[in-house]
Amino acid sequence: MVVFMGSVVAWLALFLGYMFTVKGHAFNYTEALSKSLIFLEAQRSGKLPPNHRVPWRGDSGLDDGKEANEDLVGGYYDAGDNVKYGLPMAFTVTTLAWSAIAYKSELQSAGELEHVQDAIRWGTDYFLKAASRHDRLYVQVGDPEKDHRCWVRPESMKGPRPVLEINDNTPGSEIAGETSAAMAASSMVFRRFDAPYARQLLNKAKMLFEFAKEHTHTFDGECPFYCSFSGFHDELSWAAAWLYTATHSGTYLKYIVEETVPAIVDEFNWDLKFAGVQVLLSKSFFEGTHELHTFKEHADSYICAALPESPYHKIPMTPGGLIHLRDGANLQYATGASFLFTVYGDLLKKFNQKIECGGRRFESTHLLAFAKQQMDYILGQNPLGRSYMVGFGKDPPQQAHHRGASVPLSEANSDVDCGMSFTRWFNKNAPNPNELTGAILGGPDKKDKFSDLRWTSVYTEPCTYVNSLAVGPLARLTRPLKKL
């Protein structure tokens, strides 16, 4: 009877909450998935829809684009400030679209597919506005220097909102390429139920790709906040890879094979896309496009560099087992690795493949286990035993470095000058009055230590692309463990 009742309880936990216990830690991955998407809603700019789920957010940036006589209302704020940056915004949308493609059934089972599609469309609707003119793409709204001197909610912003653009005379291949990738990937998400919209996105993706490769140059306008240290070749390859995936056109395959610069890398993030290109194109290789064998080999090399059991492992790790490459939004590297390991692990399983690292062979289970370990660390299985997702799990962060979350609704319309805004709200050592539900923060340092203070932004600032990279792994984890 005890055995029977135990099995019933375990089954109910699995069925009702997709909850798994790991070394004493129980994580409800469906809850984490849902909350990770709610955070993206908190980052929306523009006129919010009636079904918006973040009660303390309101309409903002309704005059965006006015200085350029354009309608640039909408899109996302990238982090805890009120600027709209094109490069990280596009990467956020590309990776969300990849999750929606790769894990559609899991997202649907978890009741989150529509929310993911809404999150993608919030970005692509904005990109269609930003790319409405030929050979021109608007890539930033807001003055980061002035914005960072004022700690106010986006709803309370005052003053001009300058606009940056790339064009024939001031090109920016990184941003054009990433936006092309976002449009191409998103077209695949919508093609089955909104074909006209999908075609519109794909046509813009093609146009932006041509623009990016005809006017090759790095755009420094988003520096020092989003400088592309990796150059533009990875974004051009990324865009071509997504266009080939969406169209199977030989034009894009030819570009990939002949123009892509071979690269063995050990990270995947908003600036460096080569590992994503390699994993994405490995699927086409497994399906028979043998010209892409080099990309599969480089994908294996990425895995060998990041997998702790590999003799070629070289990624810095904390004592507690977290990938740690740099301070400041470090959890993007953990969620990025978890995302690619999850996708590639499932590809290996589907095509009955293994990889070899210095004489050691690894199966899909090794990759999926590592992806899970990184996500579990974020959710609470770590030396401090705490969650790094706001509003989730044990001892979650209370002081996210975020303007909207830290200013009480009752004071939202207070006429406070910028200097006093920091004294009144930023420097206040108290929990945020508004919960930034689902935000994955910057995370701990290389020794697994964490400072939950608003002004220690390297630990406490959230970013959209940290969460977008977490969506795929969390969706995959909603499957029962035995299927990993």
Image (cartoon, rainbow, N blue to C red):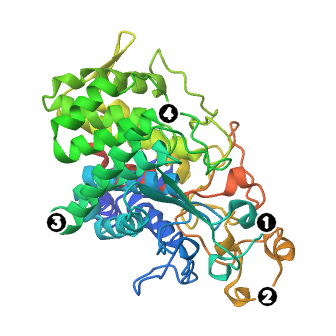
Residue 273, given in percent of the width and then of the height, sits at 44, 37
Depth check, front residue: 58 or 473 = 58
Q: Amino acid type of disc 2? A: Asp
* Label 4 or label 3, whichever comes before in sequence order: 3
According to the image, label 1 marks what residue? 149
According to the image, label 2 marks what residue? 415
Q: Residue at x 65, y 50 (%)?
A: 225
* Label 4 or label 1, whichever comes before in sequence order: 1
Q: Label 4, label 3: how many angstroms apart (C-alpha)? A: 34 Å
Q: SS of the residue at dot 2? A: loop
Residue 408, given in percent of the width and then of the height, sits at 70, 83
Q: Residue at x 47, y 16 (%)?
A: 312
Q: Amino acid type of disc 1? A: Arg
* Label 3 or label 1, whichever comes before in sequence order: 1
Instruction: Name the disc covering residue 195, or none.
Output: 3
Residue 482, given in percent of the width and then of the height, sits at 27, 44
Q: Label 4, label 1: how many angstroms apart (C-alpha)? A: 32 Å
Residue at the far front in the pictured view: 169
Whether residue 225 can be seen here: yes
Relative to 263, say whether 451 is above or below: below
Q: Amino acid type of disc 4? A: Glu
* Label 4 or label 2, whichever comes before in sequence order: 4
Q: Residues within 10 Å of mark 2 (few under 14, many from 20)?
A: few
